[in-house]
Amino acid sequence: MEPWEMREWYAEYLDACNRHDLDAIRSFVDPSVRRAHLPGGAAAWVTDMADLFQGFPDWRWRRIQLVVEDDRVAAHLRGSGTHLGPFRGIGPTRRHVNVAEFAMYRVTNGRITEFTGSENDLELRAQLGRAER
């Protein structure tokens, strides 16, 4: 894909994420996607998203910066939402959280085949008042 196509592709992916459309999200992810330090595969990706959306039904990402080079997309995002459901063993706190996220994607044939990014679990837990891991 050309850089402008990658930018459009990423905008569509982020839109699917912000709509919490798990089927659409799955269509952007290769079935055997590799994720650094996380379980691989599209099923694990979608499960993690579903868990996030259950805990934070209003979760949204805002794109800060996007860099495209060859088959790579680097994104700086702000993710935020209100903790209204269970999330990773923490009951709803009704707290609003806001975290910086940095992600690097490798895209092949319109699907994410590799992902690495910042770990925001500790920051989320701290903002929920549960800093222990």
Image (cartoon, rainbow, N blue to C red):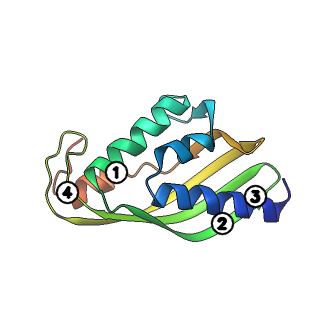
Cα distance between the residues tagged 1 and 4: 10 Å
The residue that label 3 is drawn on is 6
On the rendered structure, is 133 left or right of 109? Answer: left
**Quadrant of residue 110 in the image?**
top right
| Residue 63 % position (x, y) | 55, 69
On the rendered structure, is 39 left or right of 115? Answer: left
The residue depicted at 55 percent of the width and 47 percent of the height is 24
For the residue carrying disc 1, how many other residues have a C-alpha within 10 Å: few (<14), some (14-19), or many (20+)? many
User: Marks 2 and 1: which is nearer the front?
Assistant: 1
Cα distance between the residues tagged 4 and 2: 30 Å
**Quadrant of residue 129 in the image?**
bottom left
The residue that label 2 is drawn on is 66
- Where residue 84 is drawn, which disc sits there? 4
- Where residue 97 is drawn, which disc sits there? none
| Residue 92 % position (x, y) | 15, 53
| Residue 102 % position (x, y) | 53, 57
The residue depicted at 47 percent of the width and 61 percent of the height is 18
Residues at marks 4 and 3 touching, judged by CB atoms closer than 8 Å: no
Cα distance between the residues tagged 2 and 1: 23 Å
Q: Mark 2 or mark 3, which has the lower sequence index?
A: 3
The residue depicted at 32 percent of the width and 56 percent of the height is 123
Cα distance between the residues tagged 4 and 3: 34 Å
Residues at marks 2 and 3 touching, judged by CB atoms closer than 8 Å: no
The residue that label 1 is drawn on is 53
Disc 2 is placed on an element classified as strand
